[in-house]
């Protein structure tokens, strides 16, 4: 019994030490690659239909929508920890090399994007959490994305151009023509005012930390006024108030804008 135990201990030492001693004679890169493969095994594709993946990123409001498209591969959240193969599984999302989430659908919302240049990468993985590879190379796709996409001054210019498009795009011109036929102006429309609001908010909000106290106050008040006017014209469009009432309320909000900004500025000056 003692001899058998000694034999087991010897074999355990042999199995553990011999690979290490062999690696000791190899270069640094070979050793690193060995341990990478050891801790992160790959599942090699042997079928004729090789899986493929493409990713794209789109900004929707304050968030980012990751669009993942796969071929010769099926996303199978119902088979987690089952069926270790190369044609079913999920995607692994990495942002700047840091694992972030599993991808179990065609669309995935990224709520927070790091400031700066970012690498967005998705690797195909089997249901058993093994990365899928073809000829030793991981099957993945990545994109580079800079956030924010522009400087503060560029953002202000972009916001202005977007607000102009609310009226002068093909859709805006069509809406303006419809309103003119009933004796109304383009700014007497909740759709137009909402467009103006969104063009400012979703372009400039990312730069709020860079704004001075006065710029920030002005930005917020302008957005608030636009949303209040949106609600006024929604009330008119839903027959809750008359056209004359809507015009009166909207005009009062516009005329009160500067007073509201001035009041806020005075409060900020007094607090310094």
Image (spheres, grey):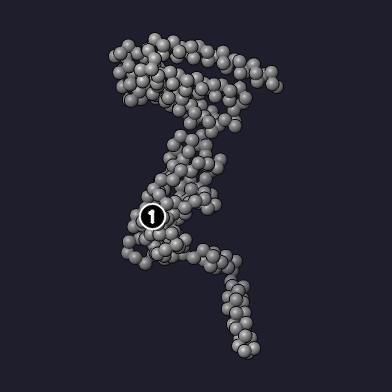
Q: Quadrant of the C terminus?
A: top right
Residue at image point 49% right, 51% down: 101
Using the rendered image of the protein, determine whether residue 268 is visible from the camera's viewpoint: yes
Nearer to me, 103 or 31: 103
Pick out the residue farthest to the front.
240
Residue at image point 45% right, 13% down: 249
Residue at image point 34% right, 18% down: 176
Residue 173, quarter of picture: top left
Residue at image point 45% right, 14% down: 250
**Depicted 24 relative to depicted 226: above or below:** below
Query: What residue is disc 1 on?
Result: 75
**Depicted 80 relative to depicted 197: above or below:** below
Nearer to me, 30 or 227: 227
**Residue 214, position in %: x, y?**
61, 22
**Residue 67, position in %: x, y?**
40, 45
Pick out the residue farthest to the right.
272
**Residue 171, position in %: x, y?**
33, 25
Q: Secondary structure at mark 1?
A: strand
Q: Quadrant of the N terminus?
A: bottom right
């Amino acid at each position: 019994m003692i001899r058998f135990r000694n034999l087991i201990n010897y074999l355990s030492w042999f199995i553990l030490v011999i690979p290490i001693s062999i690696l000791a004679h190899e270069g640094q890169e070979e050793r690193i690659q060995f341990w990478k493969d050891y801790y992160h095994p790959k599942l090699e594709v042997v079928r004729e239909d090789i899986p493929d993946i493409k990713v794209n990123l789109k900004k929707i409001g304050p968030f980012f929508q990751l669009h993942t498209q796969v071929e010769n591969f099926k996303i199978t959240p119902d088979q987690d920890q089952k069926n270790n193969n190369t044609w079913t599984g999920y995607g692994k999302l990495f942002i700047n090399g840091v694992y972030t989430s599993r991808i179990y659908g065609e669309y995935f919302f990224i709520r927070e994007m790091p400031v700066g240049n970012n690498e967005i990468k998705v690797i195909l993985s089997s249901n058993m959490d093994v990365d899928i590879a073809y000829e030793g190379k991981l099957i993945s796709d990545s994109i580079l994305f800079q956030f924010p996409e522009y400087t503060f001054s560029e953002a202000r210019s972009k916001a202005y151009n977007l607000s102009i498009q609310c009226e002068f795009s093909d859709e805006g011109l069509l809406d303006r023509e419809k309103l003119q036929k009933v004796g109304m102006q383009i700014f007497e429309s909740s759709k137009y005012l909402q467009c103006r609001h969104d063009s400012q908010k979703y372009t400039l909000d990312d730069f709020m930390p860079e704004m001075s106290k006065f710029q920030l106050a002005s930005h917020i008040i302008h957005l608030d006024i636009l949303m209040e006017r949106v609600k006024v014209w929604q009330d008119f469009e839903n027959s809750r108030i008359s056209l004359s009432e809507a015009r009166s309320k909207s005009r009062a909000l516009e005329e009160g804008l500067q007073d509201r900004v001035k009041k806020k500025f005075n409060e900020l000056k007094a607090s310094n």
